[in-house]
Amino acid sequence: MLKETTIPFGPQHPVLPEPIHVDLVVEDEKVVDATPAIGYIHRGLELLVEKKEYQEFVYVAERICGICSFIHGMGYCQGVEELMSLEVPERALYLRTFWSELSRIHSHLLWLGLAADAFGFENLFMQSWRVRELILDIVEETTGGRVIFGSSKIGGVRRDVDADTLARIGGVLTGLRREIKKVTDVFLSDATVNTRLRGVGVLSKEDAYLLGAVGPMLRASGHEIDTRKIGYAAYKNVDFEVITAGEGDSYARCKVRIGEIAQSFDIIRQVIDKIPGGPVEIKVTGSPPVGDALVRLEQPRGEVVYYVKSNGTKFLDRFRVRTPTFANVPSMVKIMKGASVADIPTIILTIDPCISCNER
Amino acid sequence: MLFRMLGPTMKNLMLKPATRRYPFDPYVPVARTRGKIVIDYEKCNFCLLCDRRCPTHAILVDRPGKVWQIDRLRCIQCGRCVEVCPKSCLAMDTHYPAPVVAGHAQAAVERHEPAAAASGTAPAAGAATGSAPASGAAAPPATPAAGPGEPKETPGA
């Protein structure tokens, strides 16, 4: 009879970019149970909504996380716009889509690098982050920041990108896409990557749905669910197919994310082609009326839900975020059971945990 | 398939570094880079809008003393003050603020005040806004004042 031992994994662990804490109950090398603990880096950002006026809170909302930053700001803005029944100009919606997809590309490239780092392929990690840097350069050129875009505001966007710049960026992205494909091809066909990812952390189609998985985690288990399909911002005007994979293992999740990188390039291409002219913001005055609003968006990590509640003053009553990482934690615990300890880093990484978002 | 990474790796050996050789090859910001907030002090009418709108309370404006002050370490370069400024005297510079050594956070506070106040009554103006150096300067005179209180307490105890 093997003796059970409890090993604390994290909050500080070489493989983790952010502090997540899981207590692993192991029998020999096999994990039999896992208990996640959430709240290590809680900062209370949601409460700040009572202290900052609704127009200034967008800066706080954007700083919930350094990777999903733009979509957090955009989700908060959409919530308040829904409360105030504001009609956002079309051009602003297209620009929001443009920046959302740029942030998706850089988030997925960041994840590819971290995953390569987790299974010990440092060279691949370096190459993934090198191409990510080129995306960040485009972000800096269009928004002025590399991590915090600071471009979403209530009633539109803060900065316009002129047609010449957009056309030039379109050309740059075409070249970048080839560059990125060279790196992602390695993920899909290299023997080392295959050995570490195939068959590791299999989440069945039923479990993925029952445990409420979201994003690439859900799509890698064969569900065709993508919040972008509800058509917020300019997604109603662009064509794209939801990328899915059937296997449900770590390799499938990697494959879905790589597919989404290519898809984001397609969406950006369509946005650049279809973007209409006109203003990028409308003037917003007064306070939001009493009421509440719920907004669902697709983060790189999956579906995110924002809830805003107003009491009729300049200070909102409540702002709440249900982050994709939080929704994916039950699935993570599920696939950890039965895995070997050596695979735990890969499993944690394949849900693409974003602890800053998760614990706000 | 086994050595899929070999090609890119060999090619990588021939390429020059992907990163900038920083001190020799200086960083060139793009036109939109959010570096730091700069003020055209002569144009400012001390309307306090930037002070009120600043999400991190980095800007302090004293209307009677005509003082405009920014704490570079608090500022998050969001550009809200530039947006709301009615006189367009605030602008976003593309260069980042100068680095500050730990323990000298006060060096990051940039203060603009009337020339006369700066030369003559600088400590008084500092005390009015309650900035850190002013309270530090006020501490030594306060100690003798507290001194007489101590002997009184000692007999009581």
Image: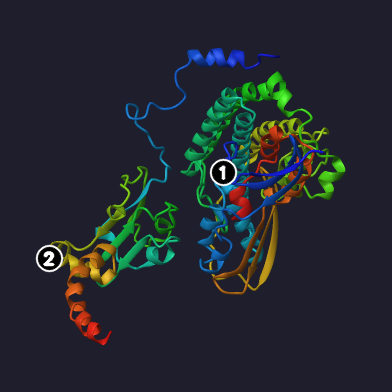
Mark 1 residue type: Gln
Q: Residues within 10 Å of mark 2 (few under 14, many from 20)?
A: few
Quadrant in the picture for the N terminus of chain A: top right
Q: Which residue is mark 2?
A: B120
Expressed as whole percent of the image width and height from the top left, the position of residue B28 reads 37, 34
Residue at position x 69%, y 24% from top?
A193
Quadrant in which residue A42 is drawn: bottom right
Q: State the residue at coordinates (64%, 61%).
A: A320
Judging depth in this view, the residue of A350 and A311 nearest the camera is A350
The residue located at (62%, 29%) in the rendering is A116
- State the scheme by which the image is colored: rainbow
- Image x and y of residue A102, in percent: 59, 39
Q: Residue furthest bottom?
A: B156
* Image point (34%, 68%), residue name: B47
Left or right, A209 with reference to A232: right
Q: Position of residue A328 (x, y in %)?
A: 73, 47
From this viewpoint, which residue is outermost toward the left?
B120
Q: Position of residue A29 (x, y in %)?
A: 73, 34
